[in-house]
Image (cartoon, grey):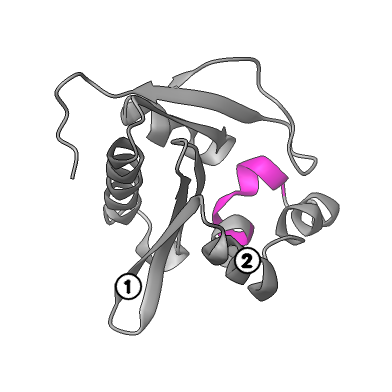
């Protein structure tokens, strides 16, 4: 997560050390362990050999809270596969939509995956834009 933010999200943090520090402040091993333990949270990792390629999380209410890809795996379809897994999990919990807040960096990716912006951009961690987005699942979508 930390490498993804630092190396891939420059259009969000603009290489500003203060913004980057705020964004990374809660990305600690202790917090990650706590996120795994939350009963309403489901966490997933994509692994190839011994390398973690992506990490994602979705809450039982359908909110995607994490979807980060390693810089080493960018543009290999890993993020799309992770998003599909997160959405399938949201559907399995009975949700008819998924919500998330996208970075500027990932905004086009989510738009291409069927999400739409549902509100004014917000600033998170001192960034200039964070986009609330939603995707409604089609009736009849298969649930795992």
Q: Is residue 126 left or right of residue 109?
A: right
- Residue 97 rendering spot, x and y as whole percentages: 38, 26
Task: Pick whichever, 53 or 10, lies toward us.
Answer: 53
Task: Name which quarter of the figure residue 48 lies in.
Answer: bottom left
Q: Where is mark 1, residue-wise?
A: 47
Task: Pick whichever, 36 or 66, lies toward us.
Answer: 36
Q: Secondary structure at mark 2?
A: helix
- Residue 136 rendering spot, x and y as whole percentages: 34, 21
Q: Is residue 90 above or below residue 46?
A: above
Q: Which mark is residue 34?
A: 2
Residue 10 on the magenta span: yes
Q: Is residue 59 above or below residue 33?
A: above
- Residue range in magenta is 6-14
The extreme top residue here reads 119
- Residue 87 rendering spot, x and y as whole percentages: 32, 40
Q: Is residue 110 above or below residue 24?
A: above
How far is disc 1 from disc 2 in space, using C-alphas? 21 Å
């Amino acid at each position: 997560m930390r490498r993804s933010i630092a190396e891939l999200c420059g259009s969000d943090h603009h290489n500003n050390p203060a913004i980057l520090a705020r964004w990374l402040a809660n990305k600690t091993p202790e917090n990650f362990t706590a996120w795994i333990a939350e009963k309403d949270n489901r966490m997933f990792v994509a692994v190839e050999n011994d390398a973690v390629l992506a990490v994602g999380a979705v809450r039982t209410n359908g909110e995607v809270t994490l979807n980060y890809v390693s810089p080493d795996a960018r543009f290999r379809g890993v993020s799309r596969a992770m998003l599909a897994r997160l959405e399938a999990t949201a559907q399995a919990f009975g949700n008819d939509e998924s919500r998330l807040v996208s970075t500027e960096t990932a905004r086009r990716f989510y738009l291409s995956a069927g999400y739409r912006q549902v509100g004014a951009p917000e600033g998170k961690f001192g960034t200039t834009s964070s986009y609330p987005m939603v995707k409604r699942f089609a009736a009849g979508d298969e649930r795992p």
